[in-house]
Amino acid sequence: MPLEAVVLDERTLQRGSEAQRVEWDRNVRELLASSTCNIDEAARLCIGVTEKQFVLAFETLDGEAIRTIAVEQESLSEHVTDYLDIVRQITAADSFNQMEALDMAKKVTHDRVGRLLKRELRELGFDLETSRRLFTLLLSLKVDTTQLPGLRGHKGVR
C-alpha cells in the first residue's frame, strides 16, 4: 500500500524559508504520487531532522507506530557531497556533451543513494523509485536546494 501522507517535524518547518517550504511540498507530492512499499495499511511518514540523523517514523493514519528507522546523515554525506558537486559542475558546463555526461553522473549518484535508502528501508519494501524520491526530499531538508540551479530532473540522452 502506498504512503498516504508525509509530515515534517515542526522545527524543520520553522527554519525553512517560504521557497524551501514550497520545494519540500513539491518533493512530498512527488514522493506520494508514486510511492511503493509493502506496508499493509494506509500509512504516513513523519520525518524528523536532527544534527546527526533523519528519523523516519512510519505510522498508521490513526497514529499507531509501524516502524521507526534512523538514517545517519553521515551515511549519506559522501553521496550528498558528490551529488551537489555534480550539480554545480552542470551549471558551469561549457558544452552540451559535458552537460549530458554530468547529468548522467548525477543520475548514477541519485540511483546509488536510492539503493542505499532502499536497503535501509528493506523491511518496508520500498522500491528504487520511491527511495530515490525520498532522497530528493531528504536532500532538500538538509541543503537549501532552492539556491542550486540545475538540480531539477535529468535530461534525456539522445
Image (cartoon, rainbow, N blue to C red):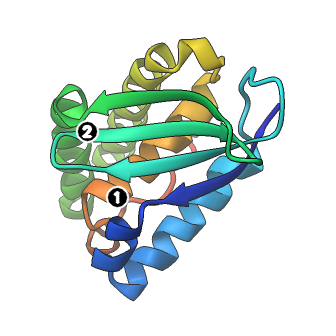
Q: Is residue 115 visible?
A: yes
Q: Nearer the viewer, residue 112 or 24?
A: 24
Q: Secondary structure at mark 2?
A: strand
Amino acid type of the residue that numbered disc 1 sits on in the rendered structure:
Leu
- In the rendered view, tell whether residue 11 sits above or below residue 136: below
Who's the residue at 16% across and 48% down the image? Answer: 51
Quadrant holding the N terminus: top right
User: Distance from label 2 to label 1 (Cα)?
Assistant: 11 Å
Task: Say left or right for 4 vs 127.
Answer: right
Q: Which mark is residue 53?
A: 2
Residue 45 is situated, as x and y percent measured from the top left of the image, at: 59, 45
Quadrant holding the C terminus: top right
* Of callouts 2 and 1, the N-terminal one: 2
Residue 135 is situated, as x and y percent measured from the top left of the image, at: 43, 41
Who's the residue at 75% across and 51% down the image? Answer: 33
Q: Nearer the viewer, residue 86 or 112?
A: 112
- In the rendered view, tell whether residue 139 sits above or below residue 70: below
Q: Which mark is residue 141?
A: 1
Q: Secondary structure at mark 1?
A: helix
Query: Badge 1, how many Cα within 10 Å: few under 14, some, many 20+?
Result: many
Amino acid type of the residue that numbered disc 2 sits on in the rendered structure:
Gln
In the image, farthest residue toward the bottom: 18
